[in-house]
Amino acid sequence: MSLKSDQEILENSMHEDDPNGNSALEQTFTEKVSPRWGPQHKGAQELAQLYSPGKRAQEFICVYTCIALMIIDFILILKHFHFDRIIVTCISAICGIITADFGSGLVHWAADTWGSVELPIIGKNFLRPFREHHLDPTSITRHDFIETNGDNFMVSIPILGFLAYCFNTKSHSDIQQDFGWISYLFLCSIFVAMTNQIHKWSHTYWGLPKWVLFLQNYHIVLPRKHHRIHHVAPHETYFCITTGWLNWPLEKLRFWSTLECLIELMTGLKPRDDDLKWAKKVT
């Protein structure tokens, strides 16, 4: 698998300024063609309708629980912070961000590539958004803060809860000894929690605050042009969506394609089979 050229990306990915995704450049005024993507795509519409009140309640609880733990842990970190630990803290924090980027890629790859929306519990609740996103990439820009971030905030709750427990059960000297580890876990959990918000920004082509554009332009978080590479069918590369720092090296190592070959060899399952099934719902 080779890296895609700019021309291939442009020709095969959804135009972000065409939220209907009807491939207008490929149609004539006399030709009626079913949309390849966008909110008018039949599969995207069916998937959007599967978003349930129960799922909304879970996301609501997770977002507010996670925010409360973020505030508590941040206050406790400031309370115990010493400037003589700043180098260790910064190195640990960067490692935490890289871990979050890899974690985002692993989860994104697994949910994009394997499983079915029909699976009990995880299908409609956790795989459905990934299928919808490929058919209607700009749908994420129409989701509010709760729907966008509920699942990622849920993942961060155990880490942040563990840190709060450590702060309240360990002595000050023990906390100082473990401060590098604490910094690693805290930044990792923050970037895990914010991954889908960062992902949403990568699909938002107008109205972003200047500080978000700054972070994107300097590749501190996932840039918009960088993420567009993933949205070239069949969505088989550039899965890391927190910072995107690991996408190029993992692609050069053929990391994801090698995993897919091994799993297909051992199980007989075809990668992205369910994703393709939903993409074919065009009438």
Image (cartoon, grey):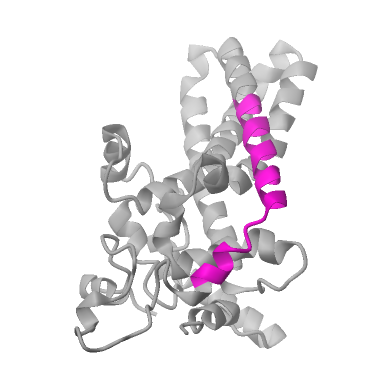
Is 70 or 78 nearer to us in this picture?
70
The relative height of residue 171 versus residue 9 in the rendered view (above or below) is above
The relative height of residue 240 versus residue 119 in the rendered view (above or below) is above
Is 94 colored magenta in this rendering? no
The structure residue drawn at horizontal position 50% and vertical position 48%, both measured from the top left corner, is 196
The structure residue drawn at horizontal position 48% and vertical position 33%, both measured from the top left corner, is 91
Residue 189 percent location from the top left of the image: 59, 38
Residue reaching furthest front? 30
The structure residue drawn at horizontal position 70% and vertical position 45%, both measured from the top left corner, is 58
The structure residue drawn at horizontal position 44% and vertical position 74%, both measured from the top left corner, is 41
Is 49 colored magenta in this rendering? yes
Residue 143 percent location from the top left of the image: 48, 49
The relative height of residue 5 versus residue 72 in the rendered view (above or below) is below
Q: Looking at the magenta stretch, what is its main secondary structure?
A: helix
State left or right for residue 119 relative to residue 29: right
Residue 273 percent location from the top left of the image: 58, 82
Query: Which residue range is magenta in the image?
Result: 44-70
State left or right for residue 7 relative to residue 145: left
Q: Quadrant of residue 232?
A: bottom left
Quadrant in which the N terminus appears: bottom left
Is 82 or 222 nearer to us in this picture?
222
Residue 228 percent location from the top left of the image: 33, 63
Q: Quadrant of residue 25?
A: bottom left
Q: Is residue 121 visible?
A: yes
